[in-house]
Image (cartoon, helix red, strand yellow):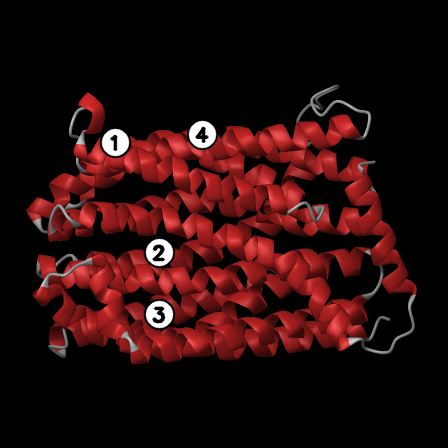
Amino acid sequence: MPPLLRKVEESDREKVAAPGRWDFRGELRALLRLAIPVVLSELAWMMMSVVDTIMVGRLSPEAIGAVGLSSSLYYIPALFGTGLLLGLDTLVSQAHGRGDHIDCRKWVMQGIYIVLLFSVPVMIIVQWIPALLPRWGTNPAVASETAAYIRLLNWGTPWLLTYACFRRYLQGMHIVKPVTFALVTANIVNLVGNWLLIYGKFGLPVMGVRGSALSTVLARVYMAGFLIAVAVWQEHKAGGSFFARFPLPNKKRILRILQLGGPAATQMIFEIGAFGGATVIAAKLSADSLAAHQIALNIASVTYMVPLGISAAAAVAVGHNIGARNPARARRTGYLAIGVATSFMALMAILLTVFPHQIVWIYSPDPRVMAIGAPLLALAAAFQIFDGIQTATTGCLRGLGYTKAPMILNFIGYWIIGLPLGYWLCFTGNLGVYGVWIGLTIALVFIATLILLEWRRKANRANLRT
């Protein structure tokens, strides 16, 4: 077993064996040691989209809208594939908590088969999406750029799913720093690729938004390859070979991953699809409104990456403690994660309220875009705290092995309440893009409140078994 894993396991077992007194500072430090690299990974992941938006922002408002619309539509099917692998958070972390390193490896091997199984259908769906844009009434100039971007971006799908599989495996075993390194350096690959390919530097062709898509594909190839290399190296240090005796597909294990990952993936689709749906609604408005919407959404997505990273760390930490037969500590860790995520999002709400114009200007100096975008940030600020609560709590529930409740609540909140209300306020209520964001805010308040009550119920039940 690698020294790093042995050291982590010995440390964790000492804490599990310790008396029941709550060492708040110690448990907070333990959570942050796991969460901070994961948060940095999520921020680095999001920075790719930020860089793409900023780099094409100097081309035209249509280019901003095209990249934003492409990303929103692409990630609906693509992230469903990566979401199916979220079950590895629970299974690998619980196996790691038991000290069963061999079982961790068995789970990731079956994850590889899921990647192979779902890559092709996801790519077929993504390739078909641009044909729907004219039917949705999308601005023709935006639709043309979107089709070019998304079809090229699609070639990175298998690499995206492979990266997701190995990331869940490494994080589940508390090996998080290589994941952070991979994503930070991938941003450098993406930034350089954008500069070279969008504007045609050093004799390369001027590709515009297609150059941004190609650089993202190259960055994903790099990320997947790097994490595979880390997994192989970790196994080599333990005296084994990662791909030796590669197992055949195990139906029972694959179904167990999908049993946990399926609802989690569906929940992600409901959530991300809702914001994609909001972008489709905004695409019916002017190019300036769509650009402002995309900028506000991009900023809200950046702040969201922190609670998302905390959520992933919480899933691993809670799952690890459940595997180590310490549900009381799992419960405390969950509440700590929710508190940290909520506190951060409260700070972000203040910043978005105080500096809206300065933040929008980073993306676009166009006065029409700034006039629409600054008020949108006030609405984004309004739902920050609720977004932090629902995101972190979802991770805590996943660590316990519960993924269905977040799926159901996201469906009701976004698709029964938020989007229909936002559409009505946008067009019938004549509030334009602001109406869309009011609907999303009300949806988040609903989801956060009920999902927190669900965590309290499930966590108390787990705590009674100590």
Mark 4, residue position? 221
Check the image and name the residue furthest to the front.
202
Q: Nearer the viewer, residue 169 or 429?
A: 169
At x 29%, y 68%, the residue is 419
Distance CA(mark 4)–CA(mark 1): 18 Å
Looking at the image, is mark 4 or mark 2 earlier in the sequence? 4
Q: Secondary structure at mark 3?
A: helix
Name the image quarter holding residue 385: bottom left
Looking at numbered disc 3 in the image, what kind of residue is underneath it?
Ile
Check the image and name the residue furthest to the top.
245
Q: Which of the two discs, 2 and 3, sits closer to the camera?
A: 2
Mark 2, residue position? 273
Q: Secondary structure at mark 4?
A: helix
Looking at the image, is mark 2 or mark 3 earlier in the sequence? 2
Looking at numbered disc 1 in the image, what kind of residue is underneath it?
Leu
Q: Nearer the viewer, residue 243 or 265?
A: 243
Distance CA(mark 2)–CA(mark 3): 13 Å
Whether label 4 touches label 1, CB < 8 Å: no
Distance CA(mark 1)–CA(mark 2): 32 Å
Q: Secondary structure at mark 2?
A: helix
Looking at the image, is mark 4 or mark 1 earlier in the sequence? 1
Name the image quarter holding residue 251: top right
Q: Nearer the viewer, residue 45 or 311?
A: 45
Distance CA(mark 3)–CA(mark 1): 44 Å
Q: Which of the two discs, 4 and 3, sits closer to the camera?
A: 4
Mark 1, residue position? 196
Q: Which mark is residue 421?
A: none
Looking at the image, is mark 3 or mark 1 earlier in the sequence? 1
Q: Nearer the viewer, residue 221 or 411?
A: 221
Name the image quarter holding residue 300: bottom left
Looking at the image, is mark 4 or mark 3 earlier in the sequence? 4
**Above or below, 260 relative to 251:** below
